[in-house]
């Protein structure tokens, strides 16, 4: 059933690559549930935004 739905989608979108059809069929047959991560848990990966001060000094010919 999911293969037929994937083939109909492929025909409607004019994307006839067999690999694409198989991927669509698998998605329809086995919907995956994404893991939800709280934003607070990712805060430890925050880094300051990069600056171009050193690069600008390099272009201007100034020593660091």
Image: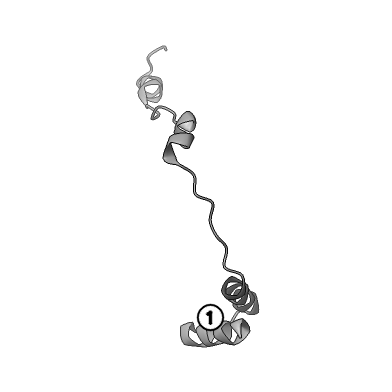
| Quadrant assignment for the C terminus | top left
Front residue of this view, candidates 63 and 35: 35
Q: Position of residue 32 (x, y in %)?
A: 57, 63
Please determine whether, in this image, residue 6 is positioned above or below residue 49.
below
| Quadrant assignment for the N terminus | bottom right
At x 47%, y 82%, the residue is 13
Q: Which image quadrant for residue 26?
A: bottom right
At x 55%, y 84%, the residue is 5
Rate crowding at label 1 as few (under 14), some (14 to 19) or many (20 or more) other CA atoms within 10 Å: few
Q: Position of residue 41 (x, y in %)?
A: 48, 35
Query: How many marks can you see?
Result: 1
Please determine whether, in this image, residue 34 is positioned above or below residue 60.
below
Q: The residue tagged with tag 1: helix, strand or loop? A: loop
Q: Position of residue 35 (x, y in %)?
A: 54, 51
Please determine whether, in this image, residue 25 is positioned above or below residue 33.
below
Can you identify the residue that label 1 sits on?
Answer: 15
Please determine whether, in this image, residue 23 is positioned above or below residue 58.
below
At x 61%, y 70%, the residue is 30
Q: Position of residue 62 (x, y in %)?
A: 37, 14
């Amino acid at each position: 059933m999911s293969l037929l739905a994937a083939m109909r989608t492929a025909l409607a979108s004019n994307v006839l690559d067999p690999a694409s059809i198989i991927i669509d069929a698998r998605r329809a047959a086995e919907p995956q549930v994404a893991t939800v991560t709280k934003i607070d848990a990712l805060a430890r990966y925050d880094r300051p935004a990069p600056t171009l001060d050193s690069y600008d000094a390099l272009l201007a010919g100034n020593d660091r």
